[in-house]
Image (cartoon, grey):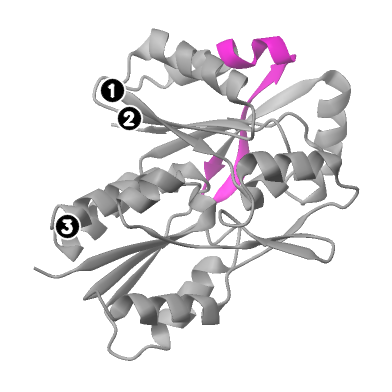
Amino acid sequence: MAKIKIITDSTADIPKNLAEELNITVVPLTVHFGEESYKDWYDLTSTEFFEKLKNSDVMPTTSQISPAAFEEVFRKELQENDSIICVTLSSKASGTYQSAVIAKNSIEDADIEVIDSMLLSYGYGMVVVEAAKMAKEGKSKQEIIGRVNYLLERIDTYFIVDTLEYLKKGGRINLAAAVIGNILNIKPVLGIKDGLVVPVDKIRGSKNIIPKMVELIKSKGYNMSNQVVGLAHGAIPDRLEELKEAIENEFHPKGFVISEVGSVIGAHSGPGVIGAFFIRD
């Protein structure tokens, strides 16, 4: 039986215990606070990052994984595995996918598949987890790739940020929308379409966030009876628990995976981010 290794990057926001349990290799992007640099997922916990973000006078920046870093990981993993499946964050949001492709092409006769998720955070992290479970069960490479591509087409992402300031500074939302949103206390519900962050709906006032999200999710008609829902938060466990309870009471899903938003996603979303990830039937 061929040994298949699942690799992803740190913005998949996969809980560490789950990544370790399923033997997923996580390659880190980097977040910078001025001259200080930290490996996403490894050097700062989510709580530590958001605490640093709140107290820092410096706007954090991020950098993608280099081809050399991917090549080093690929070569190491190929010593003990027959093939690699590497799933990255959206190529529309980062050059990380291109770096992985360059690394793959630099290793002759290597059996490496690089997949552009066109998603962010645990939206594709949950697909990586499914791939790792299949690899552990001894499924073939083609079976795993087929399932990954099937799921990536069916993941829906909904997330809300506490302030539009970070999306504005990072160029993820236009200045006029950010200013109007902050003045009117409007919080957009954001999603992912064609690999980019897009507005899905809007909510006025913090008290309406959870009911509005549940209302929006309900309108999509998901069947959650056999579905594990992914939830992610930026160091706001109380708000996360509120959303979890609301989804549980309304939809009765099979279960939940709770993820913490890492440094790189958090640098662009800012504090107070909360997200939910679903699979369309």
Residue toward you, 197 or 260: 260
CA gap, disc 2 to disc 1?
5 Å
Q: Distance between the residues labelled 2 and 3?
A: 21 Å
At mark 2, the secondary structure is strand
- Residue 102 in the image, given as x and y percentages of width and height: 48, 81
CB under 8 Å between discs 3 and 1: no
Which badge, 2 or 3, comes first in the chain's sequence?
3
Q: Name the residue under label 2.
A: 228
For the residue pair 241 and 215, the one nearer the viewer reads as 241
Q: What residue type is labelled 3?
A: Glu
In the rendered image, which residue does mark 3 sit on? 143
Residue 159, labelled with which disc? Answer: none
Q: Residues within 10 Å of mark 3 (few under 14, many from 20)?
A: few
**Percent x, y of residue 15:** 45, 43
Residue to which mark 1 is pinned = 254
Are there few (<14), some (14-19), or many (20+) residues within 10 Å of tag 2? some
Residue at figure coordinates x 78%, y 32% from the top left = 163
Quadrant of the image occupied by residue 220: top left
Residue type at the position of mark 2: Val
Left or right: residue 143 compared with residue 175: left
Tell me where the magenta segment starts and ends, as one range: 192-211
Q: Residue at x 58, y 59 (%)?
A: 92
